[in-house]
Image (cartoon, grey):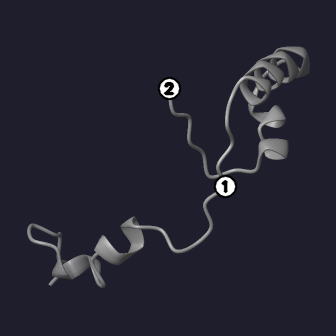
Amino acid sequence: MIVTGNRALSDWCPLFLSPVVAEALLDWLINTSHVGIMNGPGYRPGKRPKDPTDEPGAFSSG
């Protein structure tokens, strides 16, 4: 299983309703996995249209 996220592991705890559940889940996940940190430019920003009106079928107010 591959789990990805765009937040630091320290920022995951507030995403859960219970801090106890968050700690237990993250403890299990981190201690039984290999963590790979990828830094660099993302893939999707290069694929994004420069201007929303350049996209086929885009709404124009004119």
Q: Residue 47 sits in which quadrant?
A: bottom left
Q: Secondary structure at mark 2?
A: loop
Q: Is the residue 61 above or below the residue 24 in the image?
A: below
Q: Is the residue 33 above or below the residue 25 in the image?
A: below
Residue 37's disc is 1
Residue at 17% x, 70% y: name it. 59
* Of 48 and 34, the residue lying toward us: 34
User: Marks 1/2: CA distance?
Assistant: 16 Å
Q: Secondary structure at mark 1?
A: loop
Label 1 Cα neighbours within 10 Å, binned few <14 / some 14-19 / many ≥20: few
Residue 55 image offset from top left, x and y in percent = 16, 74
Residue 36 image offset from top left, x and y in percent = 64, 49
* Three-letter code for the amino acid on which mark 1 is drawn: Ile
* Of 47 and 41, the residue lying toward us: 41
Residue 58 image offset from top left, x and y in percent = 16, 69
* Three-letter code for the amino acid on which mark 2 is drawn: Met
Q: Are marks 1 and 2 in contact (CB under 8 Å)?
A: no
Residue at 35% x, 77% y: name it. 46
| Residue behind mark 2 | 1
Residue 55's disc is none
